[in-house]
Amino acid sequence: MVPTTQHERDPLGPKCMALVHEYLIQPGGSEKVVQELKAFAPQAPLYVSLFSADTMPPSWQEMEIHTSFLQGWAKGLGVLRRDYHARLKYLLPWMPLAYESFDFSSYDCVISSSHAFAKGILTGEQTLHLSYIHSPTRYLWQEGELYLERAGLRSSRSRLRLTYALSQWLLHRLRQWDFLAAQRPDLLIANSQHIRRRIRKLYRRDAVVIYPPVPLQGFEPVVHPRADYDLVAGRLVPYKRVDLAIAACERLGRRLLVVGEGPELSRLKRLAGPLVEFLPHQPQARLQELLAHCRTLLFPWVEDFGLVPVEAQACGRPVIALNRGGTQETVIHGQTGIHIPEASVDALVEGLRQADRQEWDPQQIRAHALQFAPPRFHAQMGSLLRWAWPRFQAGEPLDPKEWQT
């Protein structure tokens, strides 16, 4: 394939660019970043391991998307569906090979968007590789035991003990590959200072920090919000601890809306009482409405950055967030939300009570959120590329400490 010509806004920059992402099965926060990367480099084709046109919004079908050899396997296994999580594990051992099989020899620059395997692509010495790291692979380094437990692999039965041992061995091998893969990009970009610290600890590399772009068109305060429910929104996966939000709201007799889909849905429904309502993934206009009218957004988990809290703040609504991870940088305690000290029901209950006692200024909350809008992301990505490209061509090392935003 002959690569397409890069947008000519910077004639001194790389001409032929490509983008790489994990898989495209369900829209989420990292996919919003990819959309802005596509806007930054509109002529660049997008490479992914898997793509489901049936479950992604129609706008994705207009892009030039290249998939790996796993695409055919995924169709046979039924992975390209909304409930893909349980089946995706069968493809995990092959994911490294899927990304190593792509050929980028004709490109001057590749930007990968990675929360797992995409950073592991192979590029030649003439191709600059910038990798935007949403997180070091969470289920390899941080939440492995929780994922195995939710998958039912921790059991006293002999067959499951063997399966558990094999799963641990596979995670060990994938961790080895993941570390080596993180050494391949010429420069790592962290989506927050929190992720920069995790990159330094796990991958022994430094990174520059560029906050993700949060498209905020339509996310605006309303004059008289209903404010008769609290809200949780996102993929329903184990680490997000939506069960804590359910328990806290039920203890206080508060109505809770849970927006999202994922492997935790059936378990959470069993835990929920009559005050909890579950909604599937919502179109953006409906999500904007739900955020604008909520009492608070609950965010009781560690997120690498967290786009939804920024969207909620753009709507002028306070966020109750765990005082760890990206929300340490996106939520200002006492001004745009409440930081809770731990992921527990008691802490959430106290956070909700504190939020009720406080007067909130929707315009002040919104003003804080606007600093994370896409124009800043585009400007910083452009600045980084103008700094990195001539140094890369000259064979100079790309020291993150030398880049000035």
Image (cartoon, rainbow, N blue to C red):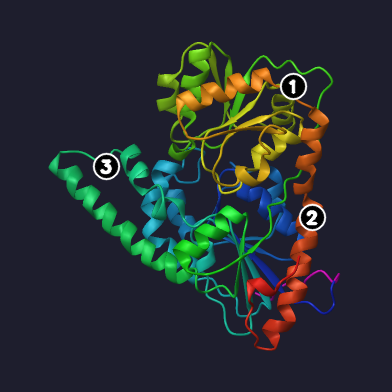
Q: Residue at x 77, y 34 (%)?
A: 365
Q: Earlier in the sequence, mark 3 or mark 1?
A: 3
Q: Which residue is mark 1?
A: 359
Please give the range of residues in magenta.
1-9
Pick whichever, 347 or 51, lies toward us: 347
Q: Can the viewer see residue 269? A: yes
Element on which disc 1 rests: loop
Q: Earlier in the sequence, mark 2 or mark 3?
A: 3
Pick whichever, 80 or 182, lies toward us: 182
Q: Which residue is mark 3?
A: 153
Q: Residue at x 52, y 42 (%)?
A: 302
Q: CA distance from mark 3 to mark 1?
A: 47 Å
Task: Say what amino acid the circle numbered 2 marks.
Answer: Arg
Left-right relation of 61 to 123: right
Q: Can the viewer see residue 69? A: no
Element on which disc 3 rests: loop
Residue 28 horizontal/vertical position (percent): 60, 43
Element on which disc 2 rests: helix
Which numbered dot is residue 88?
A: none
Q: Main secondary structure of the magenta part?
A: loop
